[in-house]
Amino acid sequence: MRLARNVVRLLIVVVVALLMASAAKRWQWPTGEVPPPAWANDYDVTTAAPEQIAAGTEAGNGPPAGWSHLVIKSLPRVKPSEVPKLPTSFIMPREVIVNRTKWMFTLFAADVVEERQGAHKRFRLRAVGMGLGAKIDGRDVVLTVEASKQTGPKLDPIQELSLKIGYGVQKQARVVIQGPSFALVDTPVTFRCGQKNRSVRYRYALLVDTQTGKLDVLCWRLGAEAGECSDLARAVLLKENLIDEAELLVDLTEFKEMLPGVKGPSELGFGVDELPPFRLELALPAALSDVVAKTRFTADEARTLEDGLRKLLPR
């Protein structure tokens, strides 16, 4: 009888142990660690270069082929009041410098794509892209030195050099954050800071409306490497399909002697003194002061910045 009772007790212990083990599989004891939010993997915070827009792409006043949005097409021009300051010589007349300066345009585009799942659709930011080009046979076309050598058009030595220098500068642009509906892009810009031209960074925040595919672009100035010439108090909401006839200021200290008696501009010889044309100026809130100038982000910080910037957009 006693043996039977012991067997029953042992079976009860085994059953209880099995039940507890099964329950433990369904419910884990708290470890003090909070699981990451569902959106944590949405943000790529590894710094990367923008895509290069393909040579031969026509760039009119709207999105270039293969891209859904034109962010900025910049057409630099020496400011008329600055032209008399330019050095001139028989070999390189002032008019030649002016014409060379406006020969090349810069292009910044974005590609927003539609995704469908059954009856539902949403829009996602696929990529941002950049390129350089010039007017060829009456059309603005993206150019590279390599493609021009293979398929034309034929470039003269100064045009080749201009493209090489331009792409060298443009390759310093970085996509700092890439998310499904948000990207943060830094581009180098020569900017008039006091009496000198300096290399600074413009920061562009691209915000996609996932329901409509509409793209809003904010821009502010980060400044030089050590933060000089920055303006983190305000941002501007850019015009759509922006054509920026950027007026350039001359820094004569950046004109170097190329040949005896002939001076030419360095990369800092010409610079702008204002942000691109905009439709609305906005104050950057103090709540975002810790993230608007960061160069390395966590997913949490990327989410904070995107949410904060979206609140600035007009409804």
Image (tube, grey):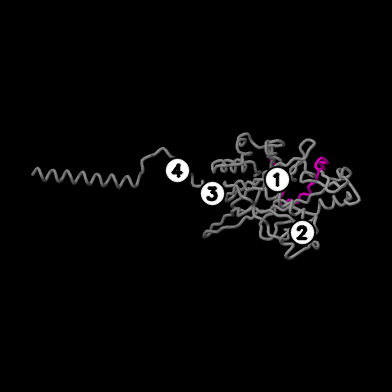
Q: Is residue 240 left or right of residue 20?
A: right
Q: Position of residue 206 (x, y in %)?
A: 64, 48
Q: Earlier in the sequence, mark 4 or mark 2?
A: 4
Span shown in magenta:
235-254
Q: Earlier in the sequence, mark 3 or mark 4?
A: 4
Q: Which residue in the structure is indicated by mark 1?
A: 188
Q: Is residue 88 left or right of residue 226?
A: right
Q: Which residue in the structure is indicated by mark 4?
A: 35
Q: Earlier in the sequence, mark 4 or mark 1?
A: 4
Name which residue type carries label 2. Answer: Asp
Q: Earlier in the sequence, mark 3 or mark 2?
A: 3
Marks 3/2: CA distance? 36 Å
Q: Which element is circle 1 on?
A: strand
Q: Residue furthest right?
A: 90
Q: Which element is circle 3 on?
A: helix
Neighbours of disc 3 within 10 Å: few (<14), some (14-19), many (20+) = some
Q: Which residue in the structure is indicated by mark 3?
A: 42
Q: Is residue 252 magenta?
A: yes
Give the camera-side residue of 193 and 231: 193
Marks 3/4: CA distance? 15 Å
Q: Position of residue 99 (x, y in %)?
A: 84, 52
How many tags in the picture?
4
Q: Is residue 152 left or right of residue 209?
A: right
Neighbours of disc 1 within 10 Å: few (<14), some (14-19), many (20+) = some
Q: Is residue 261 above or below residue 144?
A: above
Q: Residue furthest top?
A: 286
Q: Which residue in the structure is indicated by mark 2?
A: 140
